[in-house]
Amino acid sequence: MNTIAATVKTQNGGKYVRQLCKHWSHKLETQVEGDVGTVRFPNAVTTMAADGEGIAIAISGESREEVEQLTGVVARHIDRFAFREEPLVYEWAWQD
């Protein structure tokens, strides 16, 4: 399993996690409990957990290429909801 993760600083993380899961729930399987959300893509799973300082994001899947491609998809969607903020910074790192 390949996993890549990032922590994105924002004080509105819980709001963005809930919005993103609701947005994707029309086409994908999603689950939200408070400020924690999971999105199941066809070949990967994204987990997002927010607190008062940001969102911890982890994307896991069999294909390293597909997981890496989803980093851009997830970031672009969060950025759409965070358009009122300064550009958010995503520093993705592969997990062992």
Image: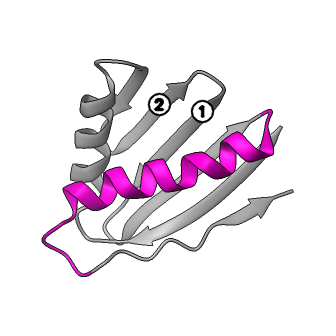
Q: Amino acid at mark 1?
A: Val
According to the picture, the residue beneath numbered tag 1 turns out to be: 45
Q: Is residue 89 above or below residue 92?
A: below
Q: Amino acid at mark 2?
A: Val
The reply to whether the magenta stretch includes residue 95 is no
Horizontal side, residue 95 vs residue 26: left or right: right
**Residue 27 at x, y percent in the picture:** 36, 18
Residue bounds of the magenta highlight: 62-86
Q: Residue at x 33, y 29 (%)?
A: 24
Colour treatment of the image: one colour
Report the quarter where the C terminus lies: bottom right
Q: Nearer the viewer, residue 31 or 41?
A: 41
Q: Residue at x 33, y 50 (%)?
A: 77
According to the picture, the residue beneath numbered tag 2 turns out to be: 39
Q: Which mark is residue 30?
A: none
Disc 1 to disc 2: CB gap under 8 Å: yes
Q: Residue at x 51, y 67 (%)?
A: 7
Q: Residues within 10 Å of mark 1 (few under 14, many from 20)?
A: some
Q: Main secondary structure of the magenta part?
A: helix
Q: Residues within 10 Å of mark 2 (few under 14, many from 20)?
A: many
**Residue 28 at x, y percent in the picture:** 42, 20
Horizontal side, residue 63 vs residue 26: left or right: right
Where, by quadrant of the figure, is residue 61 drawn?
Answer: top right
Horizontal side, residue 8 vs residue 4: left or right: left
The reply to whether the magenta stretch includes residue 75 is yes
